[in-house]
Image: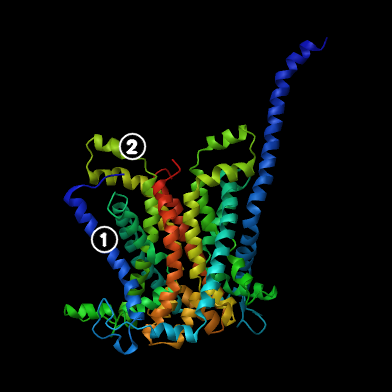
């Protein structure tokens, strides 16, 4: 890794740090706006609220079941992550390590699903879920995301980087595919799994259209749905909308700060050389 | 014992035969293993992607408003969609989005990745900050950016006013609405591009760069002749994924402008949604969505074919 030295590196650092502030500003502004009284919004903006008030949050939690909504999103996202890592890593192993006829075609059939816009599948999927009686259930939300072609692709790339000599050594020691998968390959691609876990959690946490179509009851709602319905209710009460945004961002943020160390360390450490 | 010479002769032959047999057994066994490893993902893939895909094709051949029984329409929906000037408009808006979005996230994502691959103070924190918007839901981002870019009371226009600049109407103005969506999208996704490229940069062996330094190559030379070529597989991955996602742009449009004002940001998927759920033309919606799928496939195939020209080790 190149070591930056001298004046040039300071200029670089300043540019990168300034960019980071630009990236952070919308978050800070959301927080500030959520703490500002409705009447003071839009008048002479300042970086620190003059008279911070929690009124927007009181309004938010008294009118909407936001705590329940956060739990719904959390449960669905965790389930999605666990299931997707399991299904994707197994498939990735088959594509990376097992010889079978038609492998490129099957792999292409997996990748092709990434190109199908969700909106193409929306109506047929809804009809299918309806016939199975899964409309307005968590299972109905979960089922279509039990597989991730992106995950298969990402983990296969990582597995291809694991030297095959390691498998061969394990085979000589009498290990079968299950053992090579679980004991040799999976531990070595942990950085890729961590990255995928965050991406997978995110896609579930942020999913909007499919939950919108499949969920009906207010108590089953996920965060984006609750936030979107707030937009309808509080069209110009920007402080309440910003409070809703803060609440929807915070749990993900907390989780990210916890997981980020693994992801960044995982990528930076490159345990697979 | 009279067979001994014969056996001695046969033994090597039998050994090769056995080896061949064991190889076929291993291959057959590998096929079963492959099936076992693939099944947990293949079943949902077929049930939730391929079956609905075929059904979408079936729906596209019918006139249907989602409620009353389907009526056979043949290729009428495709003819209607292809003849509709709105179709050309929504494709054009989608291309506008992609053309604005892709260079922005690529250039900034690459720049940030290169900078944060160095040993800068607080590097991990900076990486975390740039990745932050990626984890945020589109609905939250859209709500926030609508507020930031609010034409009258938004902070961006207020700051512009300090410098005597009369800020544009952003998402409320047809000429600026798509720019607003591109801006918010680039802000949200640049960290994603950064992290993929960082992973790529870290897989470049340090020795290659060290050797180039010894050979007297300056930083620009190293960037052009070593880093970028070796990074090209990651860049390729980012371009493929970004184009696929770019053509499917919807959430941010739905949440920021709903295709407005005056249809200025109406993209393909928004039109699919509107045809299906607003105008009760599920058949035409399905036809348009299949058309979009064909375009995305074509764009991806062209890239896979063209990667030989610029991707290292493709």
Give the quadrant of the C terminus of chain A. Answer: top left
What is the secondary structure assignment of the residue under circle 2? helix
Tag 1 subunit: A
Residue at screen point 42% across, 82% down: A57
Q: Label 1 neighbourhood size at 10 Å, few (<14), some (14-19), many (20+)?
A: some
Q: Which residue is mark 2?
A: B207
Q: Relative to residue A167, is residue A133 depicted above or below?
A: below
Of B290 and A81, nearer the camera is A81
Residue plotted at (52% across, 61% down):
A114
Image quadrant containing the N terminus of chain A: top left
How far across and how far down the image is residue A262, in percent? 44, 54
User: Looking at the image, is A79 positioned above or below residue A216?
Assistant: above
Question: What residue is disc 1 on?
Answer: A17
Q: CA distance from mark 1 to mark 2?
A: 29 Å
Q: Using the rendered view, name the quadrant where residue B16 is placed.
A: top right
Residue B3 placement (x, y as % from top left) = 81, 12
């Amino acid at each position: 890794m190149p070591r930056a030295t001298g004046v040039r590196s300071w200029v670089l650092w300043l540019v990168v740090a300034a960019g980071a502030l630009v990236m952070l500003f919308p978050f800070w502004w959301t927080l500030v706006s959520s703490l500002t009284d409705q009447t003071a919004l839009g008048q002479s903006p300042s970086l620190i609220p003059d008279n911070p008030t929690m009124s927007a949050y009181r309004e938010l939690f008294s009118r909407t079941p936001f705590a329940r909504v956060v739990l719904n999103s959390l449960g669905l996202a965790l389930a999605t992550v666990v299931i997707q890592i399991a299904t994707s890593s197994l498939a990735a192993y088959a594509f990376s390590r097992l010889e079978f006829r038609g492998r490129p075609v099957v792999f292409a059939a997996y990748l092709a699903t990434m190109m199908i816009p969700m909106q193409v599948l929306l109506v047929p999927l809804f009809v299918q879920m309806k016939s199975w009686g899964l409309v307005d259930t968590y299972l109905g939300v979960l089922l279509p995301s039990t597989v991730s072609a992106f995950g298969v692709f990402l983990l296969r790339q990582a597995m291809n980087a694991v030297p095959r000599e390691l498998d061969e050594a394990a085979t000589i020691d009498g290990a079968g595919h299950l053992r090579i998968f679980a004991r040799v390959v999976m531990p070595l691609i942990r950085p890729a799994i961590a990255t995928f876990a965050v991406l997978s959690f995110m896609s579930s946490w942020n999913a909007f259209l499919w939950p919108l179509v499949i969920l009906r009851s207010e108590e089953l709602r996920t965060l984006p749905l609750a936030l979107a319905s707030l937009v309808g209710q509080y069209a110009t009460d920007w402080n309440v909308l910003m409070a809703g945004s803060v609440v929807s961002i915070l749990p993900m943020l907390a989780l990210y700060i916890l997981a980020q160390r693994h992801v960044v360390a995982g990528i930076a450490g490159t345990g697979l050389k | 014992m009279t067979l001994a010479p014969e056996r001695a002769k046969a033994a090597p032959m039998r050994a090769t035969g056995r080896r061949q047999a064991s190889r076929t057994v291993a291959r057959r066994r590998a096929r079963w293993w492959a099936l076992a490893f693939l099944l947990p993902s293949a079943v949902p893939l077929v049930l939730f992607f391929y079956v609905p895909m075929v059904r979408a094709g079936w729906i596209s051949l019918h006139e249907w408003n989602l409620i009353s029984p389907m009526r056979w329409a043949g290729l009428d929906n495709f003819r209607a969609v292809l003849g509709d000037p709105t179709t050309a408009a929504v494709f054009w808006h989608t291309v506008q989005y992609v053309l604005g979005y892709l260079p922005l996230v690529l250039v900034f994502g690459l720049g940030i990745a290169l900078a944060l691959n160095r040993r800068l103070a607080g590097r991990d924190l900076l990486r975390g900050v740039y990745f932050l918007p990626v984890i945020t839901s589109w609905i939250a981002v859209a709500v926030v950016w609508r507020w930031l870019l609010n034409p009258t009371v938004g902070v961006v226009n207020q700051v512009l006013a300090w410098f005597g600049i009369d800020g544009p109407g952003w998402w409320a103005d047809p000429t600026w609405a798509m720019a607003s969506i591109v801006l918010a999208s680039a802000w949200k996704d640049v960290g994603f591009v950064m992290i993929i490229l960082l992973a790529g940069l870290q897989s470049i062996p340090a020795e290659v760069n060290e050797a180039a330094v010894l050979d007297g190559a300056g930083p620009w030379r190293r960037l052009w002749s070593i880093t970028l070529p070796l990074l090209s597989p990651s860049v390729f991955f980012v371009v493929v994924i970004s184009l696929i996602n770019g053509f499917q742009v919807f959430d941010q449009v739905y949440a920021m402008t709903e295709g407005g004002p005056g249809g200025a940001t109406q993209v393909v998927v928004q039109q699919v949604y509107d045809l299906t759920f607003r105008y009760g033309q599920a058949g035409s919606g399905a036809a348009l969505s299949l058309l979009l799928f064909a375009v995305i496939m074509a764009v991806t195939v062209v890239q896979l074919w063209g990667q030989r020209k610029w991707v290292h080790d493709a």
